[in-house]
Image: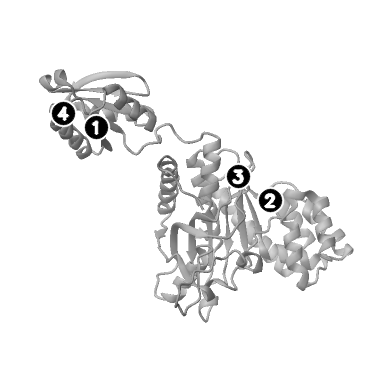
Amino acid sequence: MRDILPQKMILREYVIGVIRQVFESFGFEQLQTPAIELEETLMGKYGPDAERLIYSAGHEGGKERLALRYDLSVPLSRVVAQYPDLIKPFKRYQIAPVWRAERPQKGRYREFYQCDADTIGSASMLADAETLNVTYEILIRLGFKQFVTHLNDRKLLKGIGQYAGVPAEQSAGLYRSIDKLDKIGLDGVIAELQKNAIPEAAIDRMMPLLRVEGTNREVLAWLGGVLAGYPVAMEGIAELEEIRGYLEALGIPEQFCRIVPTMVRGLEYYTGPIYETIVEEPKIGSITGGGRFDKLVGMFMNRSIPATGTTIGIERIIDVMDELQMFPPEVGTATAQVLVTRFSPDLVTESLRMASALRQAGIKTEMYFDNDSLGKQVGYADRKGIPYVLILGPDEAAAGRVALRNLRTKQQVTVERAQAAVQIESWRASMH
């Protein structure tokens, strides 16, 4: 868990702002849920490996067993069950912290924000295609160019297991091993499968399915030919083909969304299409992930409700954007856009009036308090990353004007007081 200092918070708020704009542009509405849930709400939803990472959150004398939320999907499912009159499909987004007892490393933290968008109440693959469209739009707007979303289907994975002849009780070990293909290679996967006691005949039968390559259309056509006798696999292939067609209609280039039969999302509640986005450079793991979870809401009520959605991994996105210097120059490192200097004690009143006028014009303005030299005040603005400085000395006061200095371009101009905001906005516009 980290302290996030103001300069980093500015970068975070920029990324969150872009994500929020995209979510709302697709009609998603904001929801907020508590940080703490009943422990029974969270347990039995993620699988044993994940549930070991859930933090208990009791208090002295408390009777309920409580826990910090592990993700935003399970609390969402509780909300849908608790408020049955919500208009369906219920399209909600939530941007909030979650907690996991992880081993901290690059891109992985114990407290981090998730940015989720989910559609509850529609079984249509249009909802899944829209989720992928949301992911694509967010990353493009943030300036990412080298990324790919891997798309698969849990039904296809189940069918592959059936085709290979893997016993149902060994399917969890099968999926865990397949999911490591990118990290340990095909030989490593074979060794993992052998360690999990998967029969050699099943491994041999499965290998061609793990090696398949080609366009999305070609991969699905080949898999459909091999798995034609397995209804659950064909159902998954049909779902993927439908999504593929929608993505094509949306104009999303295939280079950004590839069907990968070896991709396995770890959480147990996924039931259909699953998706995960990776950045190719730098290697930091997945930056978005999600899928269809048609049975999760049903764990809180007496019937299942179809659902699909994704989470945007803001922590890793910020780390990548920072490392690759992707933030636009106008984002800056300071909240204030202009520093109003204090020239001398007898001109403080005039300076305060100018600061107030700039704020009224919608410009974030900081007033310098202490009676320091002008050079020290300008240096303060420069160190903080405040791009503009307003100087109101005796000459400017007598003429009803102010001096404005652009610390980025080193330009200084003198303007009428009423034109100060216009000049600053002109400089800001030139930065875009």
Picture residue at 50% right of the left edge, 76% below the top: 65
Q: How far apart are marks 2 and 4 (CA)?
A: 74 Å
Report the Cα–Cα distance between label 2 and label 3. Answer: 15 Å
Neighbourhood count class around disc 2 (C-alpha, 10 Å): few under 14, some 14–19, many 20 upward: some
Residue in view at x 18 percent, y 35 percent: 357
Judging depth in this view, the residue of 264 and 55 nearest the camera is 55
Along the line of sight, the residue nearer the viewer: 313 or 334: 334
Marked residue nearer the N-terminal end (2 or 1): 2
Residue 321, given in percent of the width and then of the height, sits at: 52, 39
Amino acid beneath label 3? Phe
Query: Which numbered marker is on residue 370?
Result: 1
Quadrant (top left, top right, bottom left, bottom right) of the C terminus:
top left
The residue singled out by tag 4 in the image is 345
Say how the picture is coloured.
one colour
State left or right for residue 368 relative to residue 243. left
Mark 3 or 4, closer to the camera: 4
Give the mark, 1 or 4, whose residue is nearer the N terminus.
Answer: 4
Looking at the picture, which amino acid does disc 4 mark? Pro
Q: Do the residues labelled 2 and 3 touch (CB within 8 Å)?
A: no
Would you name the residue on which mark 3 appears? 256
Does 336 sit above or below residue 277?
above
Indicate left or right for 108 with 410 as reference. Answer: right
Cα distance between the residues tagged 3 and 4: 60 Å
> In this figure, which residue is indicated by the disc labeled 2?
217
Residue occupying image coordinates x 81% and y 52%:
188
Residue 275 figure quarter = bottom right
**Amino acid type at mark 1:** Asp
Residue 251 visible in rendering: no
Frontmost of labels 2 and 3 is: 3
